[in-house]
Image (cartoon, rainbow, N blue to C red):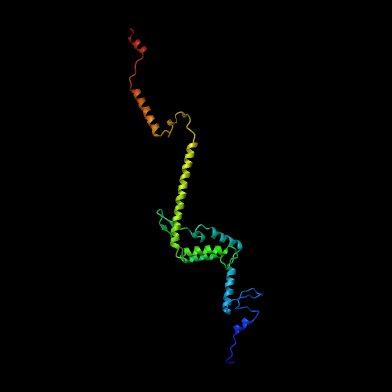
């Protein structure tokens, strides 16, 4: 009748066995009914079902969180390649697109998002993921600064590896030279004769001196022997 208004929602809230609008849950189904209206309650239930579908096994959650905690850089956390640069250190890198970053974020969040993960380290892992996503996507305005710092660190590590490699090669060469056997017939009292091998400047100088001495000896006239002179002066 006119002037009479029946608030169905108010009546539903008064029902003891229907906690809709009070933030409770039914004992029979275990479903959470929240919100002031039926539409809001339906939205909450849909979100719960979506979170349940995104949930992965606890072992996979632990593996994903461990990756986030142990990654050496923000790029590694998001499983993205490190920024590369040329020989002069000039940055040669293009930021990944929003779709790529969002897909990576959604995939990694399955292991640590508070609404889908039951792992005790989920909050710590989710903080690491959020930091990496917000920086690489430049939501926090720190992308350019971080990329420059990361490139400088990568160059320093590369130079350090190159220095270690050269030192290892030098030590290997010294060890090989010290352990190599001497040539057979070498006079150990005069090792200078064999230093550097036959192609060394010392060996070539000695060879030239020997050749000069041999040429001088061949140029001298032969001196007749005393027996030959006596036979030539005797009468026939």
Q: Quadrant of residue 41?
A: bottom right
- Picture coordinates of residue 168 (x, y %)? 48, 44
- Picture coordinates of residue 9 (x, y %)? 59, 83
Residue 83 is left or right of residue 234, and the answer is right
Query: Please, which residue is most extreme toward the top here?
Result: 235
| Residue 94 visible to an observer of this rendering | no
Looking at the image, is 155 positioned above or below residue 44? above
- Picture coordinates of residue 146 (x, y %)? 45, 60
| Residue 53 visible to an observer of this rendering | yes
- Quadrant of the snapshot with the C terminus: top left
Q: Quadrant of residue 121?
A: bottom right
Looking at the image, is 15 positioned above or below residue 166? below
Q: Residue at x 45, y 52 (%)?
A: 156
- Quadrant of the snapshot with the N terminus: bottom right
Q: Nearer the viewer, residue 72 or 54?
A: 72
Looking at the image, is 4 positioned above or below residue 74? below
Query: Please, which residue is most extreme toward the right here?
Result: 28
Residue 160 is left or right of residue 53, and the answer is left
Q: Residue at x 46, y 42 (%)?
A: 170
- Picture coordinates of residue 110 (x, y %)? 56, 65
Looking at the image, is 140 positioned above or below residue 207? below
Query: Please, which residue is most extreme toward the bottom here?
Result: 2
Q: Nearer the viewer, residue 208 or 130?
A: 130
Q: Nearer the viewer, residue 17 or 162?
A: 17
Residue 231 is left or right of residue 39, and the answer is left
Q: Residue at x 46, y 44 (%)?
A: 167
């Amino acid at each position: 009748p006119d002037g009479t208004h029946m608030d169905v929602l108010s009546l539903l809230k008064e029902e003891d066995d229907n906690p809709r609008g009070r933030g409770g849950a039914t004992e029979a189904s275990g479903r959470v009914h929240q919100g002031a209206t039926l539409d809001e309650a339906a939205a909450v239930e849909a979100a719960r079902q979506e979170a349940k579908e995104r949930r992965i096994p606890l072992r996979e959650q632990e593996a994903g969180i461990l990756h986030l905690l142990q990654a050496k850089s923000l790029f590694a956390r998001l499983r993205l390649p490190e920024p590369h640069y040329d020989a002069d250190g000039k940055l040669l890198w293009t930021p990944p697109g929003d779709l790529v970053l969002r897909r990576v974020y959604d995939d990694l969040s399955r292991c640590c998002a508070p609404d889908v993960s039951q792992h005790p380290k989920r909050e710590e892992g989710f903080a690491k993921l959020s930091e990496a996503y917000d920086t690489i996507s430049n939501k926090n305005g720190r992308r350019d600064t971080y990329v420059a710092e990361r490139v400088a660190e990568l160059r320093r590590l590369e130079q350090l590896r190159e220095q270690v490699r050269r030192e290892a090669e030098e030590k290997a060469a010294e060890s090989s030279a010290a352990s190599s056997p001497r040539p057979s017939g070498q006079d150990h009292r005069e090792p200078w004769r064999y230093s550097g091998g036959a192609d060394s400047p010392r060996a070539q100088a000695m060879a030239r001196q020997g050749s000069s001495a041999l040429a001088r000896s061949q140029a001298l006239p032969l001196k007749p022997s005393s027996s030959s002179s006596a036979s030539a002066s005797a009468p026939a």
